[in-house]
Image: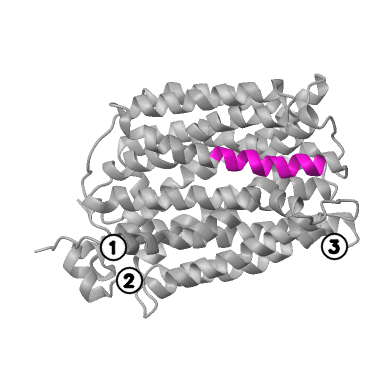
Amino acid sequence: MIKTKPDLSFWKLFNLSFGFFGVQIAYALQTANISRIFQTMGADPKSLSFFWILPPLMGLIVQPFVGKWSDKTWCKLGRRIPYLIAGTAISVLVMCLLPNAGRLSSVFWVAMLIGTVILMLLDTSLNMAMQPFKMMVGDMVNEKQKTKAYSIQSFLVNAGQVVGSVLPFALTYFGVSNDASQGVPASLTYAFYVGAAVLILCVIYTCLNVKEMPPEEFRLYHDDTDLESNQPKSNMLDLLKKAPSAFWQVGTVQFFCWAAFLFMWNYSTGTLAETCWNTTDAKSTGFQDAGDWVGVVFGVESVAAVLWAIVLPYFKERKTAYIVSIILGAIGFFMIPFIHNQYLLILPYALIGCTWSAMLALPFTIVTNALEGDPHMGTYLGLFNGTICIPQIVASIAGFGFMFVFEKMGLTMKTMMFVSSILLVAGAFFVLKIKESHGIKSSNE
């Protein structure tokens, strides 16, 4: 008979996810500054979308396999932690290299190639480090405490995003140079160094304070099909064919939402530089100040996401909460091009944070409810990551086309914020199509 997992103390639940704080600092630094780094190195603004193909592409490739392989891994270090350690080690190295990519070669195209390879390695390693935290909660926390565990994880995710987003601005404020005349400014370079150091410390803390279940103990709390020796054989294509309808319905909403956010991450620095600092010159002080301020408003977005997460449970219907959250973000995107005061930007990015909060919590809740009891949970969650990655890849390619057409029409980068607004409205419409379910047939039936 399968036993119920024991309740865990708050600190044990906290320790399971604390390393996510460091991972999210690194991820926030990357998200807020990829366009800034490559534009400062001399990249054409129209080509920026191609650099943004790499993060979701690596996530699409890496996360399903990390989920699948870690489902079958049993060693002294644990089941998921070996992947966390490997991902962190590579992340720290490439975080120190990325802001220095332009200094590694005086030849423009070589420097761009080096930067692209480094970015690819950073994306791969961060995805490898990210997945184990989601899986460890599934492995070690009982059903009653999962909401609490994922709430703690969500708080740490948003806290890490705030810290990572504002680090360059904070270093500039305290006197570190923001001059980009010789390449990526020192304030941004040192921000990546600080982020790498915090990432190491957070993951060390997790490894020292989390002990995964050995196979014998794991068997007491899980069905035998959760173990490698008895796990039903199904490849990923078979699993996708058997996925519950909610998997695909939520995935459709995800397509529009994540495409909208890809455009925000890609084009916010150029948009704010144009609307609030009246410049498009990536070497100018105004452009770098805009880049710092993007980190601040992204931090505002994350704080708003935490606060909105408190509001979400008060909605009687989950789908209503989802729709309202997405529409608030659509309003925020629509406002951005009309605002010429940097401080007033706090409002639209706070509204966007409401959408971000729902995107972090509600899709995962709906899909895990539909997958309850399935022995391939780790693999399915890795595959569900495709609904995050694929729309970003499509949007990255489409972004080049949008920018080319807009340039011919005499429109500028800020027009992409209107595109994001339209995409979120479409996403809200498709929430209406979601039919929630609780539990699916085991995929070996």
Q: Quadrant of residue 213?
A: bottom left
Q: Quadrant of residue 344?
A: top right
Q: Which residues are magenta?
A: 287-301
Judging depth in this view, the residue of 37 and 354 nearest the camera is 354
Query: How many neighbours does mark 1 have within 10 angstroms: few (below 14), some (14-19), or many (20 or more)?
Result: many
Q: Secondary structure at mark 1?
A: helix
Q: Which residue is at the far left? A: 1
Marks 1 & 2, CB-CB < 8 Å contact = yes
Is residue 288 magenta-colored? yes
Judging depth in this view, the residue of 70 and 155 nearest the camera is 155
Judge whether residue 246 can be spotted in this image: yes
**Does residue 205 appear to the left or right of 271 in the view shown?**
left
Q: Which residue is at the far bottom? A: 76
Marks 2 & 3, CB-CB < 8 Å contact = no
Q: Earlier in the sequence, mark 1 or mark 2?
A: 1
Q: Residue at x 68, y 31 (%)?
A: 343
From the image, tell me which residue sits under label 1: 140
In space, the residues marked 2 and 3 are separated at their CA atoms by: 42 Å
Q: What is the three-letter code of the residue carrying label 1?
A: Met
From the image, tell me which residue sits under label 2: 212
In space, the residues marked 3 and 1 are separated at their CA atoms by: 45 Å
Q: Earlier in the sequence, mark 3 or mark 1?
A: 3
